[in-house]
Image (cartoon, helix red, strand yellow):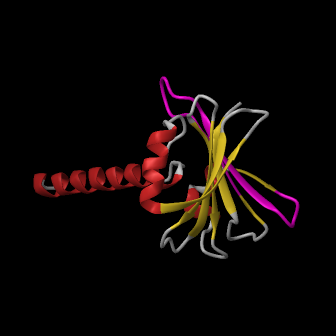
Amino acid sequence: MTKTKALQLLLLIISLATQTAAAGAQRTPQPPFGLRLGMSEEAARERLRKIATQQKEEREEEEGGEQEVWILKQDAKFNYLIAKFSSEHRLILITVVARPEQVRYGDVADLNTAAKASDGQNYSYKWKVEPGKGARAYVINARGSNPEFLTSYSVYYVR
């Protein structure tokens, strides 16, 4: 094998390894629409106003905090979003509700890394995400009554 061919082969291997790593990184479950747990209520609302219209706000008496419903503007896959804030005004729960038969469970993240559950009528895929040093672990739970398409998915902290 010539040095040129060996170098080309090495570059091809490096390229494939980089593409595989990038594809794997893209499959890590993430909170939707640029939101992240723990962000301030003000920052979350600023982000949400760009993509949605606030429909409803409810105060949660027993736990403190608020829950808001936001109707998404011009989103082909999702209809609305529910955001829950702690009494400290931090985002602690995000739930997005999909349009019928628009979002597959695998669109959220790699199904091979999910904990799966089904009773034959309801389906659930859960991913536990350990974001790294200094950040709290969270869960993404996708669920629905269709074996292929989800109805909604939620993002919340591990208790």
| Residue 60 against residue 95 in the figure, above or below | above
Locate the C terminus and report the quarter of the image it occupies: top right
Percent position of residue 134, x then y: 49, 23
Q: Is residue 85 magenta?
A: no
Percent position of residue 115, x then y: 72, 48
At 63% from the left and 73% from the top, the residue drawn is: 99
Taking depth in this image into account, of 60 and 137 the one nearest to the observer is 60
Q: Is residue 135 magenta?
A: yes
Query: What range is drawn magenta here?
Result: 118-142
| Residue 147 against residue 66 in the figure, above or below | below
At 78% from the left and 61% from the top, the residue drawn is: 123
The answer to whether 137 appears left or right of 119 in the picture is left
Taking depth in this image into account, of 116 and 53 the one nearest to the observer is 53
At 28% from the left and 54% from the top, the residue drawn is: 15
At 53% from the left and 65% from the top, the residue drawn is: 72
Percent position of residue 6, x then y: 19, 53
> Could you tell me how many numbered marks the image carries?
0
The answer to whether 111 appears left or right of 47 in the picture is right
- Rendered image quadrant of residue 23: bottom left
Locate the N terminus and report the quarter of the image it occupies: bottom left
Percent position of residue 3, x then y: 12, 51
